[in-house]
Amino acid sequence: MNSPTRFEHNDLALLTPAQMGEADRAAEAAGISGTTLMETAGAAVAVAIGERWPMRPVTVLCGPGNNGGDGFVVARHLDAAGWPVKVALLGECEKLHGEAAGAASRWKGKLAPFTPNCLDGAGVIVDAIFGAGLSRPLDGEAGILVEAMKLRRTPICAVDVPSGLDGASGMVRGIAASAELTVTCFRKKPGHLLYPGRGLCGQIVVADIGTPLSVLNAINPNTWENSMGLWLDGYPWPEPESYKYQRGGVLILGGAEITGASRMTALAASRAGAGMVTLAAPKAVWSVYAASLTNAIVRSFDGVSGWQALLEDKRRNVIAIGPGAGVGAATRQNVVAALATKRATVLDADALTSFAEAPEDLFSAICGPCVITPHAGEFMRLFHVQGDKLERARAAAKQSRAVVVFKGPDTIIAAPDGRAIINSNAPAQLATGGSGDVLTGIIAALLAQGMAEFEAAAAGVWLHGAAAAEFGLGLVAEDLPGILPRVLQKLRAYSDA
């Protein structure tokens, strides 16, 4: 399960601003001029605006770089289509360079002062002040105008990203105004999917501006947006002649006090296709589990020696520990015993918090396939790494030697070798107690059926989000396993199409 997969699904690749710069330079080397790229990009933004809103007055805010050049092209195309257009430039035309200067020279209208008054009467604002590569806080005249945009609440179309948004991290540099529509070119950037950026971009349109796909070969992207296209080819559908032990066995550690958590993990593992699910219950509460679980075998155990005895059955090829396990020395011992088997292991919740005082004890024990699924609080207890969320997830995976599922509205799946996937299909109703316990079961089941840990984690996170979206509002965690078959049936139909 440890062999890394090199994704060829470059349609799902996410490019940092620096990588997008490489793509533009490679396109120019292939014979596509920067002027052509800018003209095509601006025309695409104008088309997207026309598809989103009926004709109305537009104010186009242009910055001093290539993003501003795109804005001039947008203005020219909208003006030619009959839209009332006003253009305001940050700085002076004489100080523009390269393609931006050329685009400005082709705009034959007047320039309005770059002040909040230029927004008067606008039915749409085109934000082409700064693009995704901004590396400093937005301030001065630009900051004042962006603040005015926020106060007016006029619909905004952002070119590339809302000005002030860091395209690599999704962080806001000083200030940014929320857009209803964001038009970017060639590929999305991580900042389009990572919060708070994702909440500022509105609808995202990715425009094809003629950049050759071959440029991705030189860039070799290692970040993707989570989608079935990344892992569907290797999804472990049931085979006609397969039997339960071929479908894998999941062993789940139950807790003595919070019994519902691991029961949801067990049900999710069964629904996600594991052939056999065994729940290990402490003797004192065995009857609670046995009376309520019909989808799993319930085995009682007493202490770490009893747990180790259950680990001896190698048909249980995946072990899941954490939901409701309890925080303390007993859970630490049980985790270390599970990891020592070198079988695939999923660690969540209490299995992680139990190592908060000595995270290196956990990391040193990981010697086989392992997926850990911390939320933000659990992540902070284990890892003391710096940077934005994507950087921290990558650093944590490298440090722990496990696939890290850094949960949240923008869950990141990071592998020790530097690959990362950002999930974008999780609806807000997933923020409910117990949903992570279900995710643990789904990932464990996919591992049991033979998926590699990086792909199993990505598929599990996507299925988790799709199930929540399928159910809709009013979701509680125990609804997720029941709705999962409907999602799987749709996924199979798509796969077979």
Image (tube, helix red, strand yellow):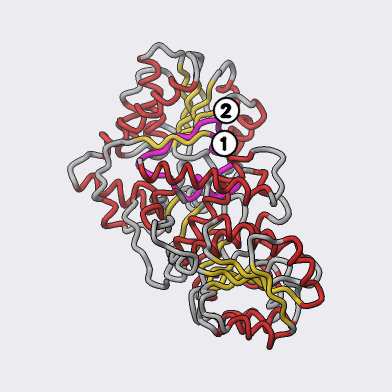
**Residue 49's spot in the image, x, y percent?**
45, 23
Q: Which residue in the protein does label 1 denote?
A: 141
Quadrant (top left, top right, bottom left, bottom right) of the C terminus = top left
Image x and y of residue 112, in percent: 49, 22
- Residue 329 visible (yes or no): yes
Contact between marks 1 and 2 (CB within 8 A): the answer is: yes
Q: Residue furthest left?
A: 31
267 shown above or below 192: below
Tell how many labels.
Answer: 2
The magenta stretch spans which residues?
177-202
- Going by the numbered disc 2, the residue's amino acid type is Thr
Residue 198: numbered disc: none
Q: Quadrant of residue 223?
A: bottom left
Residue 297 image point, x, y percent = 64, 68
Count residues near mark 1 (Cα–Cα under 10 Å), then give few for <14, some for 14-19, many for 20+: some
397 left or right of 427 in image:
left
424 versus 324 height, above or below: above
119 or 334: nearer the eye?
Answer: 334
> Residue 496 occupies which quadrant of the picture?
top left
The residue closer to the viewer here, 153 or 118, is: 153
Give the structural element (helix, strand or loop) at label 1.
Answer: helix
Which numbered marker is on residue 115?
Answer: 2
Element on which disc 2 rests? loop
Q: Quadrant of residue 299?
A: bottom right
Residue shown at the point (53%, 44%) measured from the top left: 487
Residue farthest along the bottom direction in this orientation:
305
Residue at 41% across / 50% down in the picture?
14
160 or 445, nearer to the observer: 445
Q: Residue at x 41, y 30 (%)?
A: 71
Image side of residue 231 versus residue 181, left or right: left
Sequence-wise first label, 1 or 2:
2
